[in-house]
Image: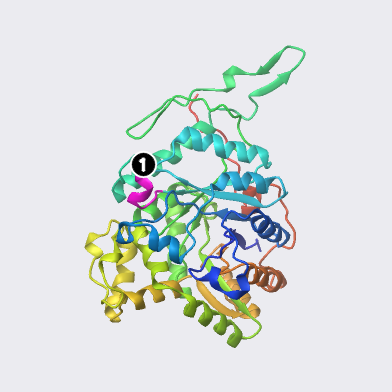
């Protein structure tokens, strides 16, 4: 049986809203703390993870109360530029994939294609990009733009992915001859203009970086809306999907997505489904539950609400924490994603304070023993609900170390996760074919 795929969400401050506060995480590192980033990545590589992943945000959240004060006061908000970090990590690792976020709404295709191709060359074929559309006015303002509508952002994202891949394909694999005797370095007939000209981008090309080891660095998408799912089925190599609450729901989502992939003329296994998972590992269930209770007790509601304000592009600061959750779904641009959350809160009579705490505890978090976590992950993998998981340690290093040292060996014993790398590239780890240039000659 092929291996489950595991990615590590790389965040020295932890993935839980209050993870940075838990005593096991002290001292509190900065988000750009090199020693922690390096140690986490080396441990993930020693555990034979497919890749590490760095998220990105292009602003400090400032929609809540029209200010960034509450956001910076109650949670970690700094975000180092991911590809600078990933390039440094590439120099101290040998096998593990290196993925970072790129915004299709604000970054130009030439810059993205060049950055990714360079990282792929530097690491011998281990680069990946997570394409996001960005969600907040704050991010748009930092690029002198206004945020496009939800539909327009996805239309632009599709054009962005096509443009970047077209630029990667402006070089054939064998374009560089480096023939000292003849004095010919590259064959110009094997390099071509991109000639991208559409409603979103105008890029002449060609790229000034040769075709990289993977041909196309691995393309990842993250999200759950209808347009997002449709785009991922057409274009993505992997999808960072929100974890479903039960096995049956996850199986249904998985089967539907794979069928869409096939409808687009692709092999079902050419898209890897990797939901997020925040593992809390205890020697007993009681100990794991106590750790989760501690995280919950340390949680401040504004840590969640300042984040939700920017994610929803709605100012939750106009309501009191003890007000009931209002009916605002019609006001949100990403209604399909957020309406179920809001309906749950309203149906259960939640105040904003309750809602913030529920959001912090819901979805990604699973608390249990190493054996119960390994069994859950194995079942979901074998029952075709997932192709693997994005592991999101709620705090570091204790939670991440527990997963590496206790859960991974149990996955290996169950025969669902590799004991050694069998490939040198990220495409190889994921079992993905290397694409040939897709350019009409």
Give x and y (percent) for residue 91.
71, 45
- Looking at the image, the residue that sits furthest to the top is 182
The reply to whether residue 172 is in sight is yes
Dividing the picture into quadrants, the one containing residue 197 is top left
Residue 419: horizontal and vertical position, in percent? Answer: 74, 63
- Name the residue nearer the viewer: 106 or 391: 106
Magenta segment: 133-141
In the rendered image, residue 41, in percent from the top left (x then y), is placed at 67, 57
Is residue 283 shown above or below 233? below
Residue 384 in sight from this viewpoint: no
Residue holding disc 1: 156
- Residue at figure coordinates x 44%, y 38% from the top left: 162
Helix, strand or loop at mark 1: helix
Quarter of the image that includes the N terminus: bottom right
* In the foreground, 254 or 302: 302
As drawn, is 197 to the left or to the right of 271? left
- The residue under the point 28% across, 48% down is 149
Q: Residue at x 44, y 66 (%)?
A: 74
In this view, the residue farthest toward the right is: 181
User: How does the figure colour the protein chain or chains?
Assistant: rainbow
């Amino acid at each position: 049986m092929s291996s489950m795929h595991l990615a590590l969400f790389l965040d020295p401050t932890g993935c839980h809203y209050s993870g940075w506060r838990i005593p096991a995480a002290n001292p509190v590192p900065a988000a750009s703390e090199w020693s922690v980033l390096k140690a986490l990545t080396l441990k993930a590589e020693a555990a034979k993870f497919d890749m590490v992943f760095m998220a990105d945000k292009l602003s400090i959240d400032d929609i809540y109360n029209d200010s960034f004060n509450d956001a910076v006061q109650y949670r970690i908000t700094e975000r180092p530029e991911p590809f600078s970090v990933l390039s440094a990590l590439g120099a101290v690792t040998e096998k593990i994939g290196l993925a970072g976020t790129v915004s299709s709404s604000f970054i130009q295709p030439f810059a993205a294609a060049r950055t990714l191709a360079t990282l792929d060359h530097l690491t011998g074929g281990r680069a990946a990009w997570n394409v996001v559309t960005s969600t907040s006015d704050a991010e748009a303002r930092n690029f002198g733009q206004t945020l496009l509508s939800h539909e327009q952002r996805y239309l632009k994202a599709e054009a962005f992915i096509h443009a970047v891949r077209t630029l990667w394909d402006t070089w054939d694999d064998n374009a560089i001859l480096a023939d000292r005797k003849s004095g010919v370095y590259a064959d110009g007939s094997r390099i071509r203009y991109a000639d991208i000209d559409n409603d979103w981008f105008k890029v002449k090309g060609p790229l000034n970086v040769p075709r990289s080891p993977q041909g196309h660095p691995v393309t990842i998408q993250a999200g759950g809306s209808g347009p997002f799912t449709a785009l991922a089925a057409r274009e993505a190599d992997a999808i960072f999907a929100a974890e479903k609450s039960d096995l049956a729901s996850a199986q249904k989502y998985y089967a539907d997505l794979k069928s869409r992939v096939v409808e687009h003329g692709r092999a079902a296994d050419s898209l890897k489904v990797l939901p997020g998972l925040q593992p809390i590992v205890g020697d007993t269930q009681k100990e794991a539950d106590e750790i989760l209770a501690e995280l919950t007790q340390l949680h401040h509601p504004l840590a969640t609400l300042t984040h939700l304000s920017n994610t929803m592009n709605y100012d939750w600061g106009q309501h009191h924490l003890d007000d009931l959750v209002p009916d605002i779904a019609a006001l949100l641009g990403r209604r399909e994603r957020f309406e179920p959350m809001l309906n749950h809160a309203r149906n259960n009579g939640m105040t904003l304070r309750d809602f913030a705490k529920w959001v912090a505890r819901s979805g990604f978090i699973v608390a249990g023993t190493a054996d119960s976590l390994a069994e859950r992950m194995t079942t979901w993998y074998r029952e075709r609900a997932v192709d693997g998981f994005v592991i999101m340690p709620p705090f570091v290093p204790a939670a991440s170390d527990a997963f590496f040292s206790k859960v991974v060996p149990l996955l290996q014993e169950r025969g669902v996760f590799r004991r050694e790398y069998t490939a040198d590239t990220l495409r190889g780890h994921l079992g993905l074919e290397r694409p040939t240039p897709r350019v009409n000659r």
